[in-house]
Amino acid sequence: MTQPLIDAQRFRALHAPGQLLVLPNVWDAMSARLLESLGAAALATSSAAVAWAHGAPDGEHFEFDRLLASTRDIVRSVRIPVSVDFERGYSTSATNVAEAVCRLAQVGVVGVNLEDGTEPPEVLASKVSACREALRREGLDVFLNARTDVVLRRMLSGPQAIDEVVRRAKRYTEAGCDGIFAPGISAADDLARVVNEVATPLNVWAAPTLPPTDQLRTLGVRRVSVGPRLALTALSAARRDAEQLMAGHWAPAPGDAPLTYPQVNGWFSQTPAPSKE
């Protein structure tokens, strides 16, 4: 069995009943190695953070080939499974999205997020279905996480919003997705309803209003991701230190013990991760 297929199996196992995968979102090889060094079981990218690192705004504003190269660097730098935030798939064509997902799988990616945004649910359902068929045909394995933005974009509110999340989640599950991502849902009753009515694992977005991990596990939530939060935290820390420096204060800004050059350089001087291609 190839390394990508082994990693895909590992990633799927992290979504098993009773599991709660805390999935940190990274944006480059350096952030990926940091999170791996802290014991992360798997990683995902943040579309926003990756875009910012390439001088572009979030929302598919830089070329897919650049995304593919950046993703390859991340995958090669770690020994743990990597999933990619693929937004709407960089195309309106389900066939093109499926081809791109296969290319991501060929560089070692084991999961992708595909979102519906403001489009009708049939658009994402067709992309998921096309991806599932293309992956089967190519002998590749990718965990397809279908994201619905009903709550995040405030398309509806209250019980009607959860009704629509459930309706879309069922449609995406029928199309072949492996998981449902519903950012913006945090109330325990709403989480329980989605878990109970949808067959695929539920992924939520970390927020101050989200229940603690033990309760999430009891509710049946399988995955928590954080979006661009870690990138923003890193940038905020760099800004504080830069402000000190620009003001002529040569000592680092107060805070936690900083990482050192030998530590970070050592991440990349060790034996490389096995090939995932």
Image: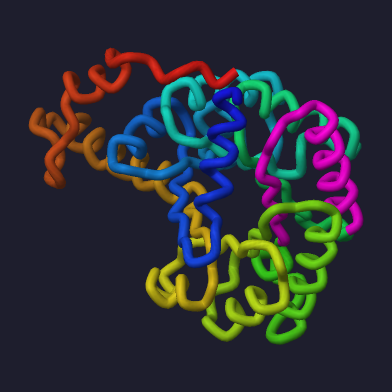
Give the camera-side residue of 136 and 197: 136
Q: Is residue 269 left or right of residue 106?
A: left
Seen in the image, is 6 located left or right of residue 145?
left
Indicate yes or no whether the magenta region holds residue 131: yes
The residue at 41%/70% (across/down) is 208
Left or right, 125 with respect to 148, comes to right
Examine the residues drawn in magenta and state their main secondary structure.
helix
Residue found 41% across the figure and 20% down from its top: 273
Which quarter of the figure has residue 72? top right
Please tell me in which quadrant of the rendered image residue 155 appears.
Answer: bottom right
- What span is colored magenta in the figure? 122-148
Say above or below: 9 vs 227: above
Task: Check the image and report above or below for 183 versus 73.
Answer: below
Colouring style: rainbow
Determine which quarter of the picture holds residue 142: top right
Task: Tell me which residue sits at (54%, 72%) in the image.
Answer: 220
Q: Residue at x 16, y 26 (%)?
A: 260
Magenta stretch holds residue 214? no
Q: Nearer the viewer, residue 50 or 36?
A: 36
- Which x, y percent locates residue 67? 63, 26
